[in-house]
Image (cartoon, rainbow, N blue to C red):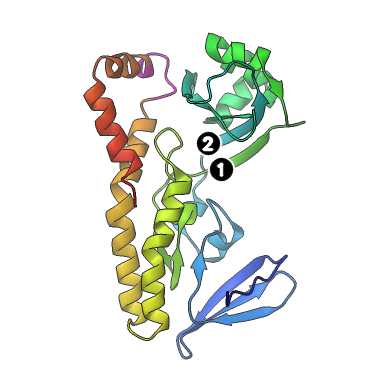
Amino acid sequence: RGVEFVLPATVADVTFDTATNRHTLTLADGRQLVARLVLGTYGKRSALDRQLGRAFFAQRSPYLGVKHHLRLPGFARDVIALHNFREGYAGISAIEDDKLCFCYLTTRDNLKRGGGSIAALESEVLAQNPHLGDILRSAERLYAQPEVINEISFAPKQPVEQHLLLLGDAAGLITPLCGNGMAMALHGAALAAPLADQFLRGHLGRAALEAAHAQAWHRTFGARLRVGRAVQRLFGGPLLSELVVGGLRHWPAAVRALMRQTHGTPF
């Protein structure tokens, strides 16, 4: 109620005029929208990041992600399985109907050494892990081609850029080994909504709004992102990751503590 969707539309540019205290959004088709407040929820990497001059965008990231949807009879619906391989790790879990989501994170260099194609990488590198080999050989693939995302950056970001309040992956991307990005996006929106309401009602100035949003975001998610980056560095190597997993298997309290540090609390 009271919401107008402008679809389809792509935001090509956002500027802020200090004289009018307003944002101007320029769409790809040339139309312009003027707004008192803009929230950026556009994902992990966008042309807007370049336009905003965000530091992480200028840094090349070695990571790429691959996603398949599979059908594999007999896979437990209540299991989220994580498997290690050289310079990467994979996860598989049940989704809607009888489908499975199978995703993995690796590096561009691993792709090159693995034969230069996704198919070669999976057969030559991932399949060296016998669990992954069984999945790749036995599962029915529901995509003609997997989805591939390049330049996945886990570098620190700021939740406010040029007076835009950023949410979800646009504000900070947690490593998939440790996080629940969708829950973080929803939680971030729940934190920002009352602040935005106070601002639009005239009860909060822009500087105070931006400071409160940044403080709430860092307080809620900052440590989770740092722990996620640290834990990810332990995986992908053939020796270190085996030592870590072997140790955690006999230290359940450490596993629970790690979960608390990276997954947050209900909100």
Span shown in magenta? 235-241
Residue 26 x, y percent position in the rendering: 65, 75
Name the secondary structure under disc 2: strand
Q: Which residue is mark 2?
A: 63
- Alpha carbons under labels 1 and 2: distance apart: 6 Å
Q: What is the number of the mark on residue 56? A: none
Residue shown at the point (64%, 67%) measured from the top left = 11
Q: Is residue 189 above or below residue 212?
A: above
Q: Visible in this render: residue 116?
A: no
Q: Is residue 13 left or right of residue 225?
A: right
**Badge 2, how many Cα within 10 Å: few under 14, some, many 20+?**
some
Q: Quadrant of residue 251?
A: top left
Residue 246 x, y percent position in the rendering: 32, 13
Residue 236 within the magenta-colored segment of the rendering: yes
Dominant secondary structure, magenta: loop
Q: Quadrant of residue 196?
A: bottom left
- Looking at the rendered image, the quarter that the N terminus falls into is bottom right
Pointer 1 or 2: first along the chain: 2
Q: How many marks?
A: 2
Is there CB contact under 8 Å for labels 1 and 2?
A: yes
Q: Visible in this render: residue 259?
A: yes
Residue shown at the point (71%, 21%) measured from the top left = 140
Residue shown at the point (36%, 26%) measured from the top left = 234
Q: What is the number of the mark on residue 151? A: 1
Residue 25 x, y percent position in the rendering: 60, 75
Q: Nearer the viewer, residue 114 or 1?
A: 1
Q: Is residue 229 left or right of residue 28?
A: left
| Amino acid type for the residue under numbered disc 1 | Glu
Name the secondary structure under disc 1: strand
Q: Nearer the viewer, residue 3 or 123?
A: 3
Residue 132 within the magenta-colored segment of the rendering: no
| Amino acid type for the residue under numbered disc 2 | Tyr
